[in-house]
Image (cartoon, helix red, strand yellow):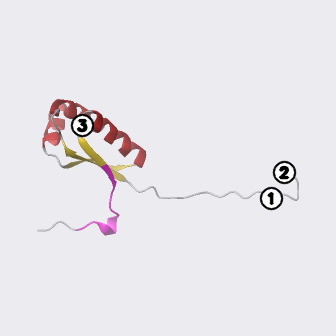
Amino acid sequence: MSDGETAEYYTSLCDDPSHEVVLIDCGPREMDVTRAVRKVTGLSLWHSRVLARRAPVALLGGLSAYRAQSAVAVLRSAGAKAEWRQEPEYEERTAPSP
């Protein structure tokens, strides 16, 4: 750069909201979905089966949008109904009812 030129640099700071992966329905291929749950969560096969049978259930939380979409793609390819959604902000969460 010459003496007369100035450069401006901007840093983009954006808070990427966290996302969660929700298993809505296991579908007819329970064993395939159980394996997919195991793959995305890292849980044992037994715990994965328990989660798959409890649908609808939140499987993962605190993920980036890309990782949540990837996990949902794995679950859907196994035959499950799954979705990813933005987790509510701390102020938006409601207290559990007694």
Task: Tell me which corner region of the image, top left, top right, bottom left or bottom right, holds residue 36.
Answer: top left
Task: Tell me which corner region of the image, top left, top right, bottom left or bottom right, holds residue 90.
Answer: bottom left
Disc 1 marks a residue whose amino acid type is Thr
Disc 3 marks a residue whose amino acid type is Val
Work out whether 63 lies above or below 74: below
**Disc 2: which residue:** 1
- At horizontal 16% and vertical 46% (from top left) the residue drawn is 55
Q: CA distance from mark 2 to mark 1?
A: 8 Å
Element under disc 1:
loop
Q: Single out the mark in the foreground, 2 or 3.
A: 3
- At horizontal 14% and vertical 33% (from top left) the residue drawn is 46
- Is the Cβ of the residue at disc 2 closer than 8 Å to that at disc 1? yes
Task: Tell me which corner region of the image, top left, top right, bottom left or bottom right, holds residue 52.
Answer: top left
Q: Which is nearer the N-term, disc 2 or disc 3?
A: 2
**Disc 1: which residue:** 6
Q: Residues within 10 Å of mark 2 (few under 14, many from 20)?
A: few
The magenta stretch is: 84-94
Element under disc 2:
loop
